[in-house]
Image (cartoon, helix red, strand yellow):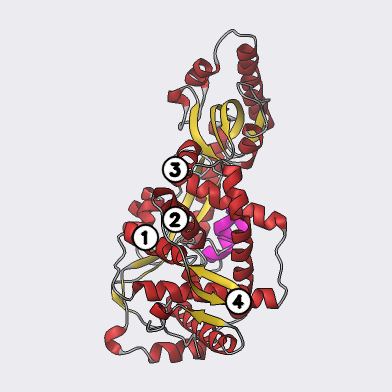
Amino acid sequence: MNFKKIIIPFLFSLLCSASIHAQEKVIDRIIAIVGVNPIMQSELEAQFQQMVSAQEPVNENTRCKLLEELLFQKLLLAQAQKDSLDVTDAQVDQELDKRIRFYIQQFGSEEKFVSFYGKSVDDFKADLKDNIRDLLLAQQMQSKISNDISVTPNDVKKYFNNIPDDSIPYINAEVEVGQIVKRPSITPAAKKEAKDKIEEIRQRIMKGQSSFAAMAALYSEDPGSANKGGMYEHIQRGQFVPEWDAQAFKIKKNEISEVFETVYGFFIIQLIERRGEEVDARSLLISPKIDVADLVKSKLSLDTIYTKLSATDTLSFSEAAAKYSDEEESKNSGGLLVNPNTGATRFQMDEIGQMDQTIAFAVEKLKVGELTKPMPMTTRDGKQAYRILFLKNRTTPHKANLIDDYQKIQGAALAKKQQDAVQVWISKKVGVTYVHLADDFKNCMFNSKWVN
C-alpha cells in the first residue's frame, strides 16, 4: 500500500464529500476514530467515488484499502497534535489558495465551481481551513518519519538482488542528452525601442484613438492572444509570470496597466473581469528585437566551442557547458537535460519528443559521444538562440540492471525502506494511540494491525 498517496487526494476527498451531500442526502456516520480524530463515512465514499470517476480498478476490498490510508492520515495527525507541531496561518492560506485554484481550473471557471457547491469561494475556504491545517500537520509528521532515510550502494544492491528474476522490470530505450546554449545579447537600444513602442501604443489607447483589442490584434507579439485581440479568459493566479499576475490582480475593471517588463518583453494589460483568483484580461506584448549580427555572434561563439570539443580530449562536454552555456538549468547539471517527469537525466524518446521535437530528430541521428553542429532554437521565453546537442548515452530495451538503471533501482530501494519505516512507525504508535473501528470494518484485511 502506498501511504504517500493519502496526502495528495485528501482535499479532493473533502470536495467530493461536499458534492455528495450537494447532490443527495446521505446518512453520514463515524466509521473510525484515531486519537480524537474521527473518520466519516462520507470521507471514505468520496475517495471511492474519485477512483470510480478516474476509471481505476475497484473490488470488494477497495474500501478497506482506502480506509487504511485514512487511518494512516489520522494517525499522523494524532501524533502531530501530541508532538505540538504547528503550521502558520500564512502556510494554511497559501496551500488553500493553491488547491482551490487547481479545482476551479478543473471546473473551467469560478462561476461553475460556485454554482456546483452553492457557496462563494471565500465561504468554501472558510469551511476547509481547519481541514487544510490538519493536512499540513499530517504532512509535517510524515516528513519526520521518512525524510532522513537514505540508502547506501549496498542497500541498493541488496534490494535488487532480492527481486525475483521474473519480477525484474523491463526498461524501454532511453537517452541522456546534453546541450550548450548561446543566447544573443539584447542591447539597451533594443530594449528602449520596444519600451517606447509599447508606451506609444498605450497612449493611443488611453486617448481613445483605438481600442485595446484592435491594437493588440495589430501589434501584439504574444502568439497566444494576438489573434483574439489580446484576450485571455479564465486565467488563474500563478498561471502566468509573476509580473503579469501583479498587474492583473491589482488594476481595476477596464483599467489599463502601466508598461511592465518580463522575461518575454514589455507588456500592458487591460482587466476585463476579476473573479476571486481568476481573471479575464487583454494582453499586449512587444519584445525587444534581437539584432541579426548578435545572433550570428552567438552561432560563431558556438562554432568555436564545437571545434574545441571536436579537436581535443582536454575539454569535456560537461566542463564546456559549465563554462560557456547561457542556459542555467542544464549548465549546472553538466549540460544534461533533466526529465521533468522523473527528476533524472534519462528520457524515453517519446518524452524527448513531447518536450522538444527538434531535439528528438537531432538525437536520432547521433551516435553516443557525438555532437551536433550549432543549430537554431527557440528558448522557453520565445527568444532565438543557438545550441549544440550532445548524446551522452543511449540504452536499448532491456531488463533492469544495476549498471544501466542504478538511479531507478536506487529510487525503488529508497521507497521500500521508507515504507518499511512507516510500517514500523504505525505498529509502534497504534499501541499507544486510541483507535476504534466500526464493526462492519473490523474484518478488513489491512496491512497493519489497527485494533488490538
Task: Decide whether the magenta segment is chiefly helix, strand or loop.
Answer: helix
Q: Amino acid at mark 1?
A: Gln
Residue extending furthest top?
A: 209
| Disc number lying in front (2 or 4) | 2
Q: Which mark is residue 147?
A: 4
- Tell which of 449 and 416 is nearer to you: 449
Residue that badge 3 annotates: 116
The Cα atoms of the two marked residues, 1 and 4, are separated by 31 Å
Circles 2 and 3 in contact, beta carbons < 8 Å: no
Determine crowd level at label 1: few under 14, some 14-19, many 20+ residues with C-alpha closer than 10 A. Answer: some
3 or 4: tag closer to the N-terminus: 3
| Disc number lying in front (1 or 4) | 1
Residue that badge 2 annotates: 16
Q: Which residues are magenta?
A: 316-332
Quarter in which the N terminus is drawn: bottom left
Mark 4 falls on what kind of element? loop
2 or 3: tag closer to the N-terminus: 2
3 or 1: tag closer to the N-terminus: 1
Mark 1 falls on what kind of element? helix
Q: Amino acid at mark 2?
A: Cys
Q: Which mark is residue 49?
A: 1
- Regarding residue 370, the answer to whether it shows in the image is no
1 or 4: tag closer to the N-terminus: 1
User: Looking at the picture, does residue 180 appear above or below residue 33?
Assistant: above
Residue 224: percent from the left, percent from the top?
A: 46, 32
The Cα atoms of the two marked residues, 2 and 3, are separated by 11 Å
User: Looking at the picture, does residue 150 appear above or below residue 199?
Assistant: below
The residue located at (62%, 30%) in the rendering is: 266
1 or 2: tag closer to the N-terminus: 2
Circles 1 and 4 in contact, beta carbons < 8 Å: no
- Tell which of 30 and 335 is nearer to you: 30
**Magenta run includes residue 266:** no
